[in-house]
Image (spheres, helix red, strand yellow):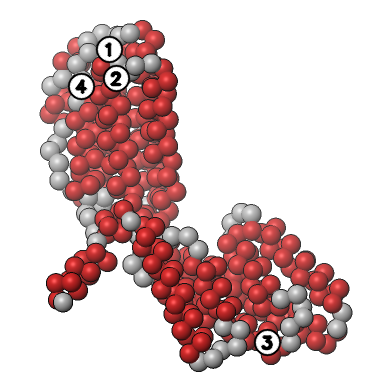
Amino acid sequence: MLDLLRKTTDVLFDTNRRFRQARQFHAIRVALALLVSIALTTGIDIPHGEWATITVLVVIGGLQHHGNIRRRAAERGLGTLIGALAGLALIVQQSYVGLPLLTYALMAVICGYCAYHAIGKGGYIALLAAITVVITAGHGNQNVYDALWRTVDVFIGTAIALVFSFALPAYASYAWRIRLAELLRASAAVHRKMQSGFTDAAEQRTAMLDLGTRLIPLRGLIPSVAKETGVPAAEFEEIQHAARVCISALELMAAIEQETGMREGEDPGIEPALLSMAELLETGHAPSPTASMAASPANALPGPLPFMARQLAADLARMRARLDRLSAQHGFPYGAR
Protein backbone atom coordinates (compact mmCIF):
# COMPACT_ATOMS: atom_id res chain seq x y z
CA MET A 1 0.00 0.00 0.00
CA LEU A 2 2.79 2.39 0.91
CA ASP A 3 4.66 1.49 -2.29
CA LEU A 4 1.54 2.21 -4.36
CA LEU A 5 1.05 5.53 -2.58
CA ARG A 6 4.71 6.47 -3.13
CA LYS A 7 4.53 5.55 -6.83
CA THR A 8 1.34 7.60 -7.24
CA THR A 9 2.97 10.58 -5.54
CA ASP A 10 6.05 10.27 -7.73
CA VAL A 11 3.85 10.29 -10.84
CA LEU A 12 1.91 13.36 -9.69
CA PHE A 13 5.00 15.39 -8.84
CA ASP A 14 7.12 14.27 -11.78
CA THR A 15 7.49 17.42 -13.88
CA ASN A 16 8.66 15.49 -16.91
CA ARG A 17 5.64 13.20 -16.80
CA ARG A 18 3.29 16.18 -16.43
CA PHE A 19 4.93 17.74 -19.49
CA ARG A 20 4.81 14.58 -21.60
CA GLN A 21 1.24 13.73 -20.57
CA ALA A 22 -0.15 17.26 -20.23
CA ARG A 23 -3.49 16.44 -21.86
CA GLN A 24 -4.12 13.49 -19.58
CA PHE A 25 -3.32 15.53 -16.47
CA HIS A 26 -5.56 18.36 -17.63
CA ALA A 27 -8.42 15.95 -18.40
CA ILE A 28 -8.17 14.48 -14.88
CA ARG A 29 -8.03 18.00 -13.38
CA VAL A 30 -11.20 19.08 -15.20
CA ALA A 31 -13.03 15.84 -14.36
CA LEU A 32 -12.23 16.19 -10.64
CA ALA A 33 -13.29 19.86 -10.66
CA LEU A 34 -16.58 18.83 -12.26
CA LEU A 35 -17.21 16.17 -9.60
CA VAL A 36 -16.47 18.63 -6.80
CA SER A 37 -18.89 21.15 -8.30
CA ILE A 38 -21.66 18.56 -8.60
CA ALA A 39 -21.05 17.22 -5.09
CA LEU A 40 -20.99 20.69 -3.53
CA THR A 41 -24.06 22.16 -5.22
CA THR A 42 -26.08 18.93 -4.91
CA GLY A 43 -24.97 18.18 -1.36
CA ILE A 44 -26.19 21.49 0.05
CA ASP A 45 -29.07 21.73 -2.45
CA ILE A 46 -28.09 25.01 -4.11
CA PRO A 47 -30.74 26.13 -6.63
CA HIS A 48 -29.66 26.01 -10.27
CA GLY A 49 -26.43 24.23 -9.28
CA GLU A 50 -25.88 23.13 -12.87
CA TRP A 51 -24.71 26.67 -13.66
CA ALA A 52 -21.83 26.25 -11.23
CA THR A 53 -20.78 23.16 -13.16
CA ILE A 54 -21.13 24.95 -16.49
CA THR A 55 -19.03 27.80 -15.11
CA VAL A 56 -16.30 25.34 -14.09
CA LEU A 57 -16.07 24.13 -17.69
CA VAL A 58 -16.10 27.66 -19.08
CA VAL A 59 -13.58 29.12 -16.66
CA ILE A 60 -11.02 26.35 -16.31
CA GLY A 61 -10.32 26.73 -20.03
CA GLY A 62 -7.27 25.29 -21.70
CA LEU A 63 -4.12 24.05 -20.02
CA GLN A 64 -2.35 26.88 -18.17
CA HIS A 65 1.31 27.15 -17.28
CA HIS A 66 2.29 27.98 -13.74
CA GLY A 67 3.74 31.36 -14.64
CA ASN A 68 0.49 32.42 -16.29
CA ILE A 69 -2.04 31.20 -13.74
CA ARG A 70 -2.14 34.28 -11.47
CA ARG A 71 -2.86 36.62 -14.36
CA ARG A 72 -5.49 34.29 -15.79
CA ALA A 73 -7.03 33.84 -12.34
CA ALA A 74 -7.36 37.61 -11.94
CA GLU A 75 -8.88 37.89 -15.41
CA ARG A 76 -11.35 35.11 -14.68
CA GLY A 77 -12.43 36.63 -11.40
CA LEU A 78 -12.82 40.12 -12.84
CA GLY A 79 -14.71 38.94 -15.93
CA THR A 80 -17.07 36.87 -13.80
CA LEU A 81 -17.73 39.74 -11.39
CA ILE A 82 -18.45 42.22 -14.18
CA GLY A 83 -20.77 39.79 -15.99
CA ALA A 84 -22.65 38.80 -12.84
CA LEU A 85 -23.30 42.42 -11.83
CA ALA A 86 -24.40 43.34 -15.35
CA GLY A 87 -26.72 40.32 -15.48
CA LEU A 88 -28.27 41.25 -12.13
CA ALA A 89 -28.78 44.82 -13.32
CA LEU A 90 -30.63 43.52 -16.39
CA ILE A 91 -32.97 41.41 -14.25
CA VAL A 92 -33.64 44.27 -11.87
CA GLN A 93 -34.56 46.66 -14.68
CA GLN A 94 -36.77 43.96 -16.26
CA SER A 95 -38.57 43.48 -12.95
CA TYR A 96 -39.28 47.19 -12.57
CA VAL A 97 -39.66 48.34 -16.18
CA GLY A 98 -41.16 45.18 -17.63
CA LEU A 99 -40.19 45.75 -21.26
CA PRO A 100 -38.68 42.56 -22.75
CA LEU A 101 -37.57 44.35 -25.93
CA LEU A 102 -35.60 46.83 -23.85
CA THR A 103 -33.97 43.95 -21.95
CA TYR A 104 -33.02 42.22 -25.20
CA ALA A 105 -31.61 45.45 -26.60
CA LEU A 106 -29.58 46.13 -23.45
CA MET A 107 -28.25 42.54 -23.46
CA ALA A 108 -27.27 42.88 -27.11
CA VAL A 109 -25.49 46.17 -26.40
CA ILE A 110 -23.61 44.70 -23.41
CA CYS A 111 -22.55 41.56 -25.29
CA GLY A 112 -21.62 43.60 -28.35
CA TYR A 113 -19.48 45.86 -26.17
CA CYS A 114 -17.79 42.78 -24.67
CA ALA A 115 -17.23 41.36 -28.16
CA TYR A 116 -15.60 44.64 -29.22
CA HIS A 117 -13.09 44.28 -26.38
CA ALA A 118 -12.74 40.49 -26.76
CA ILE A 119 -10.39 41.11 -29.68
CA GLY A 120 -7.17 42.42 -28.22
CA LYS A 121 -5.75 42.98 -24.76
CA GLY A 122 -8.13 41.98 -21.98
CA GLY A 123 -10.13 39.86 -24.40
CA TYR A 124 -10.50 36.98 -21.97
CA ILE A 125 -12.10 39.28 -19.37
CA ALA A 126 -14.59 40.60 -21.93
CA LEU A 127 -15.46 37.10 -23.16
CA LEU A 128 -16.12 35.76 -19.66
CA ALA A 129 -18.15 38.87 -18.81
CA ALA A 130 -20.45 38.31 -21.81
CA ILE A 131 -20.89 34.61 -20.98
CA THR A 132 -21.66 35.39 -17.34
CA VAL A 133 -24.25 38.02 -18.33
CA VAL A 134 -26.20 35.39 -20.27
CA ILE A 135 -25.79 32.77 -17.52
CA THR A 136 -27.06 35.18 -14.88
CA ALA A 137 -29.84 36.97 -16.75
CA GLY A 138 -30.91 34.28 -19.22
CA HIS A 139 -33.13 36.05 -21.77
CA GLY A 140 -34.35 38.48 -19.16
CA ASN A 141 -37.16 36.19 -18.03
CA GLN A 142 -35.61 35.31 -14.66
CA ASN A 143 -36.81 36.71 -11.37
CA VAL A 144 -34.42 38.43 -9.00
CA TYR A 145 -34.30 35.40 -6.67
CA ASP A 146 -33.18 33.07 -9.48
CA ALA A 147 -30.72 35.66 -10.79
CA LEU A 148 -29.13 35.98 -7.36
CA TRP A 149 -28.73 32.21 -7.06
CA ARG A 150 -27.29 31.99 -10.57
CA THR A 151 -24.80 34.67 -9.57
CA VAL A 152 -23.85 32.63 -6.50
CA ASP A 153 -23.50 29.53 -8.70
CA VAL A 154 -21.22 31.40 -11.07
CA PHE A 155 -18.92 32.46 -8.22
CA ILE A 156 -18.89 28.93 -6.78
CA GLY A 157 -17.97 27.49 -10.16
CA THR A 158 -15.28 30.12 -10.67
CA ALA A 159 -13.76 29.42 -7.24
CA ILE A 160 -13.64 25.67 -7.89
CA ALA A 161 -12.10 26.19 -11.32
CA LEU A 162 -9.41 28.49 -9.94
CA VAL A 163 -8.49 26.05 -7.19
CA PHE A 164 -8.04 23.25 -9.69
CA SER A 165 -6.14 25.52 -12.08
CA PHE A 166 -3.39 25.77 -9.45
CA ALA A 167 -3.36 22.00 -8.84
CA LEU A 168 -0.28 20.34 -10.36
CA PRO A 169 0.17 22.89 -13.16
CA ALA A 170 2.50 22.50 -16.12
CA TYR A 171 5.68 24.59 -15.89
CA ALA A 172 6.34 26.80 -18.89
CA SER A 173 10.04 26.91 -18.01
CA TYR A 174 10.29 23.13 -18.24
CA ALA A 175 8.37 23.05 -21.51
CA TRP A 176 10.63 25.80 -22.92
CA ARG A 177 13.81 23.92 -22.02
CA ILE A 178 12.65 20.61 -23.46
CA ARG A 179 11.21 22.14 -26.65
CA LEU A 180 14.38 24.14 -27.25
CA ALA A 181 16.45 20.99 -26.71
CA GLU A 182 14.28 19.13 -29.23
CA LEU A 183 14.77 21.97 -31.73
CA LEU A 184 18.56 21.82 -31.30
CA ARG A 185 18.61 18.04 -31.74
CA ALA A 186 16.49 18.37 -34.88
CA SER A 187 18.89 21.05 -36.17
CA ALA A 188 21.82 18.70 -35.54
CA ALA A 189 20.01 15.98 -37.49
CA VAL A 190 19.46 18.38 -40.41
CA HIS A 191 23.13 19.38 -40.38
CA ARG A 192 24.15 15.71 -40.32
CA LYS A 193 21.91 15.07 -43.29
CA MET A 194 23.50 18.00 -45.14
CA GLN A 195 26.87 16.28 -44.91
CA SER A 196 25.61 13.34 -46.96
CA GLY A 197 23.27 15.43 -49.09
CA PHE A 198 19.49 15.65 -49.22
CA THR A 199 17.76 13.29 -51.60
CA ASP A 200 15.90 16.10 -53.32
CA ALA A 201 14.60 19.64 -52.80
CA ALA A 202 11.33 18.35 -51.31
CA GLU A 203 13.17 16.52 -48.52
CA GLN A 204 15.22 19.62 -47.77
CA ARG A 205 12.14 21.84 -47.71
CA THR A 206 10.30 19.44 -45.39
CA ALA A 207 13.25 19.36 -42.97
CA MET A 208 13.46 23.16 -42.83
CA LEU A 209 9.71 23.56 -42.37
CA ASP A 210 9.91 21.14 -39.45
CA LEU A 211 12.56 23.30 -37.76
CA GLY A 212 10.44 26.42 -38.23
CA THR A 213 7.42 24.64 -36.80
CA ARG A 214 9.41 23.63 -33.72
CA LEU A 215 10.58 27.22 -33.19
CA ILE A 216 7.13 28.87 -33.19
CA PRO A 217 5.77 27.52 -29.84
CA LEU A 218 8.85 28.75 -27.95
CA ARG A 219 7.88 32.42 -28.34
CA GLY A 220 4.45 31.87 -26.83
CA LEU A 221 6.05 30.38 -23.70
CA ILE A 222 8.42 33.29 -23.05
CA PRO A 223 6.08 35.52 -20.94
CA SER A 224 5.19 32.62 -18.63
CA VAL A 225 8.82 31.46 -18.41
CA ALA A 226 9.92 34.98 -17.44
CA LYS A 227 7.32 35.10 -14.65
CA GLU A 228 8.23 31.67 -13.33
CA THR A 229 11.98 32.27 -13.28
CA GLY A 230 12.28 36.00 -12.63
CA VAL A 231 14.55 36.30 -15.68
CA PRO A 232 13.79 39.26 -18.00
CA ALA A 233 11.86 38.22 -21.10
CA ALA A 234 14.49 40.00 -23.23
CA GLU A 235 17.01 37.27 -22.31
CA PHE A 236 14.76 34.58 -23.76
CA GLU A 237 14.02 36.74 -26.79
CA GLU A 238 17.76 36.83 -27.50
CA ILE A 239 17.95 33.04 -27.29
CA GLN A 240 14.89 32.80 -29.53
CA HIS A 241 16.65 35.08 -32.01
CA ALA A 242 19.81 32.94 -31.87
CA ALA A 243 17.79 29.80 -32.59
CA ARG A 244 16.12 31.53 -35.52
CA VAL A 245 19.54 32.59 -36.88
CA CYS A 246 20.71 28.98 -36.59
CA ILE A 247 17.75 27.73 -38.64
CA SER A 248 18.23 30.46 -41.26
CA ALA A 249 21.92 29.63 -41.59
CA LEU A 250 21.21 25.93 -42.00
CA GLU A 251 18.60 26.72 -44.65
CA LEU A 252 21.04 28.88 -46.60
CA MET A 253 23.80 26.30 -46.35
CA ALA A 254 21.46 23.52 -47.47
CA ALA A 255 20.26 25.61 -50.41
CA ILE A 256 23.83 26.30 -51.55
CA GLU A 257 24.79 22.65 -51.24
CA GLN A 258 21.66 21.56 -53.12
CA GLU A 259 22.34 24.08 -55.88
CA THR A 260 26.08 23.56 -56.32
CA GLY A 261 26.57 20.00 -55.10
CA MET A 262 29.38 21.26 -52.84
CA ARG A 263 29.91 20.26 -49.22
CA GLU A 264 31.18 22.49 -46.45
CA GLY A 265 34.13 20.21 -45.71
CA GLU A 266 35.14 19.47 -42.15
CA ASP A 267 32.46 20.15 -39.54
CA PRO A 268 33.61 23.10 -37.38
CA GLY A 269 31.94 21.72 -34.27
CA ILE A 270 28.37 22.61 -35.30
CA GLU A 271 26.76 19.28 -34.54
CA PRO A 272 28.63 18.76 -31.23
CA ALA A 273 27.65 22.28 -30.16
CA LEU A 274 23.97 21.68 -30.93
CA LEU A 275 23.90 18.31 -29.19
CA SER A 276 25.84 19.62 -26.20
CA MET A 277 23.36 22.47 -25.62
CA ALA A 278 20.44 20.07 -26.05
CA GLU A 279 21.93 17.75 -23.42
CA LEU A 280 22.48 20.67 -21.06
CA LEU A 281 18.90 21.85 -21.43
CA GLU A 282 17.53 18.37 -20.78
CA THR A 283 19.80 17.17 -17.98
CA GLY A 284 21.96 20.08 -16.83
CA HIS A 285 25.16 18.16 -17.68
CA ALA A 286 27.13 18.01 -20.92
CA PRO A 287 30.76 18.27 -22.11
CA SER A 288 31.91 21.60 -23.47
CA PRO A 289 32.12 21.66 -27.28
CA THR A 290 34.40 24.69 -27.49
CA ALA A 291 37.65 22.75 -27.91
CA SER A 292 36.45 20.89 -31.01
CA MET A 293 35.22 24.13 -32.53
CA ALA A 294 38.48 25.98 -31.98
CA ALA A 295 40.64 23.19 -33.41
CA SER A 296 38.56 22.61 -36.54
CA PRO A 297 40.55 22.63 -39.81
CA ALA A 298 37.51 24.22 -41.53
CA ASN A 299 38.89 27.60 -40.42
CA ALA A 300 41.47 27.31 -43.17
CA LEU A 301 39.10 26.30 -45.96
CA PRO A 302 38.06 28.90 -48.55
CA GLY A 303 34.59 29.39 -50.06
CA PRO A 304 31.13 30.48 -48.88
CA LEU A 305 30.10 27.24 -47.18
CA PRO A 306 33.10 26.97 -44.82
CA PHE A 307 32.70 30.68 -44.04
CA MET A 308 29.01 30.21 -43.19
CA ALA A 309 29.84 27.12 -41.14
CA ARG A 310 32.40 29.08 -39.11
CA GLN A 311 29.89 31.90 -38.64
CA LEU A 312 27.20 29.47 -37.49
CA ALA A 313 29.64 27.83 -35.08
CA ALA A 314 30.44 31.26 -33.62
CA ASP A 315 26.73 32.05 -33.25
CA LEU A 316 26.17 28.76 -31.46
CA ALA A 317 29.09 29.51 -29.13
CA ARG A 318 27.48 32.85 -28.23
CA MET A 319 24.15 31.13 -27.64
CA ARG A 320 25.84 28.61 -25.37
CA ALA A 321 27.56 31.43 -23.47
CA ARG A 322 24.21 33.18 -22.95
CA LEU A 323 22.64 29.98 -21.60
CA ASP A 324 25.63 29.46 -19.29
CA ARG A 325 25.29 33.02 -18.01
CA LEU A 326 21.60 32.51 -17.28
CA SER A 327 22.45 29.35 -15.40
CA ALA A 328 25.15 31.07 -13.35
CA GLN A 329 23.02 34.12 -12.50
CA HIS A 330 19.58 32.59 -12.09
CA GLY A 331 20.02 28.81 -11.94
CA PHE A 332 18.14 28.62 -15.22
CA PRO A 333 17.78 27.02 -17.71
CA TYR A 334 19.86 24.08 -16.49
CA GLY A 335 18.36 23.87 -13.04
CA ALA A 336 15.69 21.20 -13.40
CA ARG A 337 12.61 21.41 -11.21
Task: Name the quadrant containing residue 205.
Answer: top left
Q: Which mark is residue 268?
A: 4
Q: Is residue 240 above or below residue 75?
A: above
CB-based contact (under 8 Å), mark 1 and mark 2: yes
Q: Is residue 126 above or below residue 188?
A: below
Q: Residues within 10 Å of mark 4 (few under 14, many from 20)?
A: many
Q: Which mark is residue 263?
A: 1
SS for callout 2: helix
Locate residue 258 relative to residue 131 in the image: left or right. left
Q: Residues within 10 Å of mark 2 (few under 14, many from 20)?
A: many
The residue at the point 48 percent across, 90 percent down is 43
Residue placed most toward the observer, 226 or 98? 98
SS for callout 4: loop
SS for callout 3: helix
The residue at the point 30 percent across, 33 percent down is 186
Q: Amino acid at mark 1?
A: Arg
CB-based contact (under 8 Å), mark 2 and mark 3: no
Q: Amino acid at mark 3?
A: Asp
Q: Amino acid at mark 4?
A: Pro
Of callouts 1 and 3, which one flags the residue occurring earlier in the amino acid sequence? 3
